[in-house]
Amino acid sequence: MSPTEHGGQQDRAAADAPVIVAEGPAAAEAAAEDAPIAGAPELIADSIGDYARIWLQRVRNGESGALPVLLGLVAVVVFFQVKDSLFLSAGNLVNLMVLAAPIILLGMAEIFVLLLGEIDLSVGYNAGIGAVVVFWAAYTLPWWVAILIGLACTALIGALLGVLITRLSLPSFVVTLAGLLALEGLLILLIARTGHGAGGSISNPSNILDDLTAGNLSPAAGWVVMVALVGLAGLFMVTRDRRRRANGLVAPPLGVTLLKVAFMAVAGVVVVLVCNTNRGSGLVTLEGVPWVVLIVLAILVVYIVLTGRTRFGRYIYAIGGNAEAARRAGVNLSAIRTLAFTLCGFTGGIAGILLASQLNSIGSNLNGGQYVLFAVAAAVIGGTNLFGGRGRMLHAVLGGLVVATIANGLALIGLSAAATDIVTAIVLIVAVTIDTQARRTRTST
C-alpha cells in the first residue's frame, strides 16, 4: 500500500471517528485525540521524503492547512514593501509585532468559543473593562495585584455569559451581543468614576505596565532566551517522540522533528536579528526583543498545551465536532462551554491590558465592536472553522499578523482607517472562500 493510499484511509477514518464515540468520557477523550492524529502526515510518513509526498498529496486534495495564509501574508508583505521601502525596516517590523499582539490575543480568546461553534461578540469591550480596572487599581495597589484583579473581572464576565448561554439554552450570538452593549455602557460608567482621567479616559499610572509593550530585552538576553526556548522545544519534541515509540505508538521520523526544530531556530534568529537592530534616531539607542513578544509566545505555548494535551482540550474539539456524540459519551457540555467562555474573557483581558499599554491610556471611545471583528477575522483568516471542531491557537497568530500587517501597511502608505476595514473584509471573504472550496474538494474526494 502506498503512503498516499494509506493517508487517504487514515483521513476517512479520522472523519468518521467522532460518530462512534459511545463509552464514557475516556472513550470521548480517546476519540477526540486520535481523530486529528490519524491523518497527520508526520505520523504516516517513514522519512522526510514520505512526509513531503504525503503533504503534497494532501494539498492537492484540498487539505492545504495554513499554506494559503502564509502565501497570502507573503503577498501582502511584498505589496507593501513595493509601495514603501520602509515597510521591512527593523523599526516598522518591531512596531508591527507590538501592534499585532492584542489582535493575536483577541483571536486566541475567540478560538476557545469558535471551536465549540459559538461566538463571543463582547470580548472587545470585555478587554476594555479589564484595562480600565487594571489602571484604576494600579493607582493604589502594586501593578501585579492590579493585573490579577483586572483579569479576574474579565474572566468572571466571560463565565457569566457562559452560564447564561448554557443554563438557559440561549444563543451565544444574542447573549454576547447584549453583553457588548452592556459592557460598552459599563466602560463609560467606570471611566467616569475613576477620578484619574480627563476627557473620558484614564491614563497609565505604572511604568511597568507601560514596559509591557514599550520595554525590550537587552540584545544579549534576546539571544540567550531564543537559544533556550528553541533548545527546550527541541528537547521536548524529541523526548515525546521517543516516549511514544517506547510505548508502541506511532511517532514522526526523527528527520521531520529535526526539520521542525531547525525551522523554529531560523525563525528565532530572524526575529532576534531584526529586534536587535538599532531602531533609534540620532543619539538615542533603541534595540532588543520587545517584552510583548515573549508574553504572546508564552501564552501561545500554554494554550497549545491546554487545547492539545489536556482533557479539556480534547473535549472542546469533541463537542465542536459532534456535540450529541460527546454528550452521549458522558462529557459535561455545560461545564466545558462555560469554561471556554471564561477563558475567552480571561484572554480578552490580557489583550486589553496590552492594548492599553500601547496607547498608554484607555478611554470610553474604545471601539470594542471593531476589535471583536478583528478577533473573529484573525481566527477565521488563520484557518479556524466558524462552525466548530477545527482550529488551532497558531491560527490566531497567523491571522492576527495578516490583520496587523494590513493595518500597518495601509497606515504607512497614507491610507485611512476606513481602507483598513475594507481591505480586511476582502481578505476575510477570500480566506473563507478558499476554506470552503478546500472542504468541498475534500468531500468530493
Image: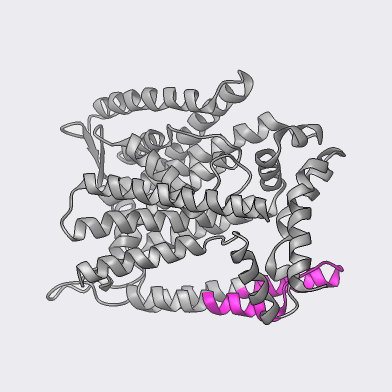
Q: Is residue 46 visible?
A: yes
Q: Position of residue 346 (x, y in %)?
A: 49, 40
Image coords of residue 51 (percent x, y): 67, 75
Foreground residue among 299 and 432: 432
Q: Nearer the viewer, residue 310 or 8?
A: 8
Q: Nearer the viewer, residue 112 or 127?
A: 112
Where does the C terminus fall, quadrant-wise?
A: bottom right
- Residue drawn at x 70%, y 78% is 50
Location of residue 34 with respect to 143 vertically, above or below? below
The residue shown at (21%, 70%) is 86
Q: Colour scheme used in the picture?
A: one colour
Q: Quadrant of residue 112?
A: top right
Q: Where 244 falls versus 154 (above or below)?
A: below
| Secondary structure predominantly adopted by residues drawn in magenta | helix
Answer yes or no: is residue 224 visible: no
Residue at figure coordinates x 77%, y 48% from the top left: 16
- Residue 66's place in the image compared with 262, above or below, is above
Residue found at x 55% / y 36%: 342
Counting the numbered discs, the total is 0
> In screen coordinates, is 125 left or right of 417?
right
Look at the image and say whether residue 64 sits in the magenta stretch.
Answer: no
Q: Position of residue 185 (x, y in %)?
A: 32, 23
- Please report the bounds of the magenta region as a residue range: 234-263
Location of residue 310 in the rendering, given as x and y in whole percent from the top left corner: 70, 50
Task: From the viewer's perspective, tell me whether residue 64 is left or right of residue 429.
Answer: right
In the picture, residue 332 is in which quadrant?
Answer: top right
Horizontally, residue 424 falls left or right of residue 155, namely left
